[in-house]
Amino acid sequence: MTDRQPVPAWLAEAVLYQIYPQSFADSNGDGIGDLPGVTARLDHLADLGVTALWLSPCFVSEFGDAGYDVADYLTVAPRYGTNEDLAELVRQAGARGIRVLLDLVPGHTSHRHPWFQHSARTPGDDRYIWSDRITAPVHEWIPNQGPRGGFYRANFYPIQPALNFGYARPDPAEPWRSPVDAPGPRANRAALRAVMAHWFDLGVAGFRVDMASSLVKDDPEHVETGRLFGELRDWLDAQYPDRVLIAEWGDPARSVPAGLHADFFLHFTGRALRSLWDNGTGSQGSWAHGEPCFFDADGRGDITEFLTAWERADAAVDGHGLVALPTANHDFSRLVCGPRTREQAACAFAFLLTWPSLPVIYYGDEIGMRFVPGLPEKEGSQFGSEARQGSRTPMQWDGTAGAGFSTAPPADFYLPLDPDPGRPDVAAQRADPDSLLHLVRRLVRLRRDTPELGTGAPVTVLSAGYPFVYRRGDAHLVVVNPRREPAELASPELPAGELLLGAGVDLAPGKLRVAGFGHGVFRL
């Protein structure tokens, strides 16, 4: 790891913004967001201070899993526009100091992808995982409808045949297992490089890598998966040293040393992220642990679980990569969910934008859009008990009937708008200097202008409770009280300080009083 190129400075300093393209902005009135719509709204991101945006999959697909079933990695889906529209988005974003990252789905394709269509009719082709019989677990093996016969292994839905990157371990009972250096796995690694190079050459700054830990099968310690990404990183460092790969792996202590530039804390791998945000409402899956989170108005949570995971990851990363911390994502409930209000979300942003992680804002969270319960299934959004559609509703730009998202009739929207008559919108919050939008904007700028609040400066926790108090570097102190009741702290380590941003915090040498939902950033 020490011989690799350092993380590009732009990523280390970034504020990343995730866009779910079908729900962000519709330019042609068909009710589905598109790339020209994103381009038209770039000034919102620039004003917010965002420096990089990540688009969820926008490639050709039958949309059985909202685009995570890719049928052509090199062509934009017609409902989103054209390749030229994507190139124009990259150009216009770059003119505003914003880089564009795409979503790479390397573990599987659509069953309609030409690679799979060829494999399904060609005995001996090992780009995918094939067996002549069903093996356990049965639900992963799908009967082939092509002339080859047999069964293919699928990831998630049957329409998502798994690409073959090999197995870490042979099994005499499963002779069809390919080693990682077999022709099919080698061809798939080469194809990944070709796909990435195509978009890098068009100006794309990097990729979020979907389900990165799952490529090599039966790899319990992820040794072979790590080697795969190590090879990719060596190629990137040699050919595209300013481009990046951000993993959906969920274990930065393992993924970053392997070669990824950054990795997310995720809701379904470990409890670090859930211990912060998951209040037991919204989308709940088998991963839900049913315990209070720290950002809880009743003050029943515990920050130490997050801190333990953070310390482990930070030590393993050792300055060679980043831990990404999202407000939410397309699979996980928004900050404003169930009883959590926009007022409470302010504390979450005060923490997110002053902690030494890579902050990731999910579209709409900057205005406090809420998780909308009870929506219909859409393009695979209902994954078992997980009602992910509640986090995928149209962006709320203004107070009109269509919320500025589209000129189509609201009945034709990709998903229904939040029906709450008090739903927030960008226009109203832009006109209100005390809005959540303006708070987030000020926090982003404070982070940008204050290196000690970024990823490079140390963090020292002074109080791991209510209030949560930590120093950044030598000259800054952050105070967050996410519960409704006031909190106090007496400590000789508390200095006097100048309040730079925040409300409800009274700091004096040795003593701190914080109102309910109070937060503050101080210069010492």
Image (tube, rainbow, N blue to C red):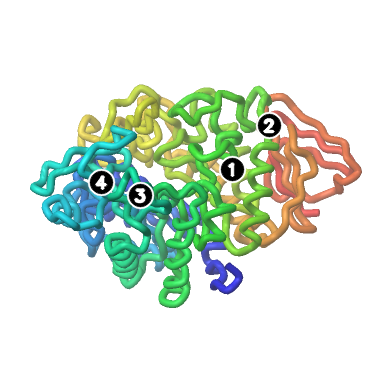
Q: CA distance from mark 3 to mark 4?
A: 20 Å
Q: CA distance from mark 4 to mark 1?
A: 39 Å
Closer to the N terminus: mark 1 or mark 2? 2
**Residue indicated by mark 2:** 302
Name the element at disc 2: loop
Which is more toward the observer, 67 or 176?
A: 176
Closer to the N terminus: mark 3 or mark 4? 3
Residue neighbourhood size for the residue with mark 1, other residues' Cα within 10 Å, grouped as few (<14), some (14–19), many (≥20): many
* Amino acid type shown at disc 4: Pro
**Disc 3 or disc 1, which is closer to the eye?**
3
Closer to the N terminus: mark 4 or mark 2? 4
**Residue indicated by mark 4:** 161
* Amino acid type shown at disc 2: Asp
* Amino acid type shown at disc 1: Phe
**Residue indicated by mark 3:** 56
**Disc 4 or disc 1, which is closer to the eye?**
4
Q: Quadrant of residue 20?
A: top left
Name the element at disc 1: helix
Q: CA distance from mark 3 to mark 1?
A: 22 Å
